Each structure stands twice: as C-alpha cells, then as structure tokens.
Image (spheres, rainbow, N blue to C red):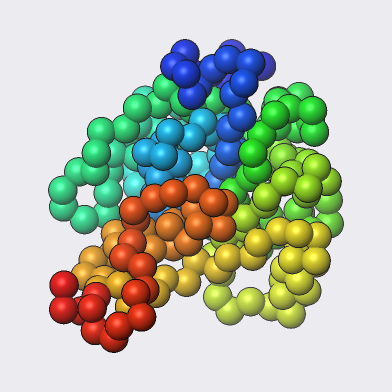
Amino acid sequence: MSDSGASGSGPSGGGADRRPWVVGVSGASGTPYAAAVLRGLLAAGEAVDLVVSRAARLTVLDETGISFRDAHWQQDLLEWLERPLDAGPPEPVKLDAVRYWPAGDLAAGPSSGSYPAKGMLVVPCSTASVAGIALGLSKDLLQRAASVTLKERRPLVVCVREAPLSGQTLRQLVALDDAGAVVLPASPGFYAGTRSAQQLVDFVAGRVLDAAGVPHGLYRRWAGELGTGRAE
C-alpha cells in the first residue's frame, strides 16, 4: 500500500476478516450521491475501500470547493461527508472503517481478485467509466477494481449520471447488465414526500444501497397507499 493509503483500527476497519465495499467515485457530476452512499455504508457499520478518480477530484472541487488530496484524504473526506446540501448537519461521521487507495495505484488491494471485498459501488459513474468497465480497459484503479468485481462474480452497482445517453453508452450499459452488474441511473423518485435537494440525493443513494443489500433509512419506502409521503 502507498503511504497515502490507510486502514482503520476499529473492528470494521481492520483485521483479517475485514470485507469492505469498494466505492469508486468517477468524474461525473453528482458527488453528493457519493457522499450520501458513503455516509449510509458507514452508518450501517460497513467497511469501505475508497477510490476517487483523477477526474472526480476536479468534480469534487467544482461542486464542493474541497480539494481532495492523497496526503490529506482523511481531513478532506471528513469535510466532504459532513457537508450536506441543505441546512442542518448530518450525524457525525467516523472514518475508522475507511481505507483509501489512490486511483493510480494499480498494485492496490482491490486490483486483485484475491483481495476480500463484498462488491463495488461506482457512484456517480461517468460514461467514460461505463465504457472503460464494459470494455475491461483497466486504465486506473477504479476501472480495474470494477473489472475484478465482475470476474469474481461479486455485486457491482453502476450509478450512471448522464443525460441524454448515446446509443454507444446504452449498448455498453446493456453489456454491463449482461455481465451481472446492476445499472442504476441517478434518477430520484418523488413519491416519498421529498421537500429538499438532499432528500432527492438520499433517495438515489438509498436505491444504490438497496441494490447492494445494505440496510438504511435514507428514504421513505412505498407502502401501497397514495399520498402518504405528501401528507407527512
């Protein structure tokens, strides 16, 4: 592991039985989705291996004003996760269960199928990352880890964030579906009584966690009765 990587010392963060979810953040717009997914995983007691692509650093800087740096990843990640879109801070975030891998480190743990992981969530997923994963290019650690996830038959959730989608990208998404990935567009629902931008973000993040089988309370679920979300 490079000097910029770190493993947690708590029960979820370290130890021989550690099996994290790999979270890849690509350069597509939608870094609040990634933050909400990370908060949800940590709240559920899950260990996380984080990979932030080079393009994603620019998007994080543009959308949040935060410079995500390898040497100061813990400080920058904490600032990112503790900054919701709307007024009112979320619950305090602890990073004990997070391990960070630089995107250029192709010798990192998640680059190997023998590295224990539960699966991978790519959120948001750019069309460039969709293409790289579908074609098996492995141009960086994010693409390589996703390819490993597919070949090891582990869950891979691709939260694509782009509009409109070209025919080429649609064909690549079908190829990922055929390979066993879950293609989950960043498309929020409004039936849960949404009243803020953060609730729309949390809806998408909750659907990502649903696809991974991770319990959460990020949104109000449909209960079979019209108007309940609006009434509450």
Nearer to the camera, 180 or 50 = 180
- Outermost residue to the bottom: 226
Q: Is residue 126 left or right of residue 187?
A: right
Q: How many marks?
A: 0
Dividing the picture into quadrants, the one containing residue 191 is bottom left
The percent position of residue 157, horizontal first and vertical second, equals 62, 55
- Say whether residue 66 is visible: no
Please give the name of the residue rendered at 27% of the width and 54% of the height, measured from the top-left corner.
Answer: 85
Please give the name of the residue rendered at 38% of the width and 63% of the height, measured from the top-left corner.
Answer: 203
**Can you say whether 196 is above or below 36 in the image?**
below
The percent position of residue 201, horizontal first and vertical second, equals 37, 61
Please give the name of the residue rendered at 74% of the width and 80% of the height, measured from the top-left corner.
Answer: 167
Nearer to the camera, 117 or 168 = 117
The percent position of residue 204, horizontal first and vertical second, equals 44, 62
**Can you say whether 53 is above or below 32 in the image?**
above
Q: Is residue 33 left or right of residue 228?
A: right
Quadrant where the C terminus is found in the figure:
bottom left
Q: Is residue 29 left or right of residue 122?
A: left
- Outermost residue to the front: 224
Please give the name of the residue rendered at 54% of the width and 51% of the height, measured from the top-left corner.
Answer: 213
**Can you say whether 19 is above or below 81 in the image?**
above
- Say whether residue 47 is visible: yes
Nearer to the camera, 226 or 202 = 226
Quadrant where the N terminus is found in the figure:
top right
Nearer to the camera, 204 or 58 = 204
The percent position of residue 178, horizontal first and vertical second, equals 80, 66
